[in-house]
Amino acid sequence: MTMDTDVRRKSCSFCGVRGKRGMKFGGGLGAMICESCVEHYHELFQSRSRTKAASKPPWESMSDTEILANLPLISQTAAQVDEFLVEWVELARSRKISWAEIGKAFGVSRQAAWERFAQRVEQVRSRSTSA
Ligand SMILES: [Zn+2]
């Protein structure tokens, strides 16, 4: 298994902060969350449940500059999730799960799954053996 668990190569999928040594991130399905976002959303959900106030989505009050600043952060999250997906396909392959079964999980053919992932799975493996 070759999961990249180094927090320095992760970023928070909610605020975009880059990981540093000693930081803690929670993760799930490729999305990562930093401690301050966990606290922020915990407080937000707590206060909403007390007031039952429906707030407007945050982008409605954002400036154009803020909208533009979010574009690379969303792209960074997409790349992180994509890399996580490749790591999980590599995990499946390391368990001898066939390309046919992997394709079936995605609803595509064995060939389509292989074409999408085989080369990148090899890159993940060579990264882990050279590290
Ligand atoms: Zn965060």
Image (spheres, rainbow, N blue to C red):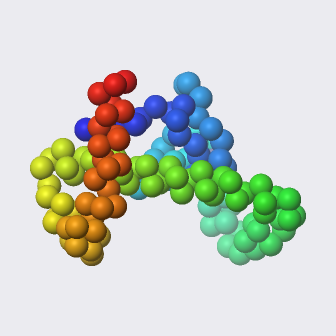
Q: Residue at x 28, y 53 (%)?
A: 118
Image coordinates of residue 62 in percent, x first then y, are: 83, 65
Image coordinates of residue 111 in percent, x first then y, are: 22, 67
Report the side of 84 relative to 16 (left or right). Answer: left
Q: Identify the image quadrant of residue 22.
A: top right
Q: Identify the image quadrant of residue 46.
A: bottom right
Q: Residue at x 41, y 35 (%)?
A: 5
Q: Residue at x 35, y 49 (%)?
A: 120
Residue 4 lies, with reference to residue 12, above or below; the image says above
Q: Identify the image quadrant of residue 48.
A: bottom right
Report the side of 25 relative to 123 (left or right). Answer: right
Residue 69 lies, with reference to residue 123, above or below; the image says below
Image coordinates of residue 72 in percent, x first then y, are: 68, 54
Q: Residue at x 62, y 38 (%)?
A: 18
- Depth order, front residue of 19/95: 95
For the C terminus, the image quarter is top left
Image coordinates of residue 40 in percent, x first then y, are: 66, 50
- Depth order, front residue of 56/12: 12
Report the side of 111 relative to 6 (left or right). Answer: left
All told, the count of numbered labels is 0
**From where the camera sits, is residue 60 visible?**
yes
- Depth order, front residue of 79/38: 79
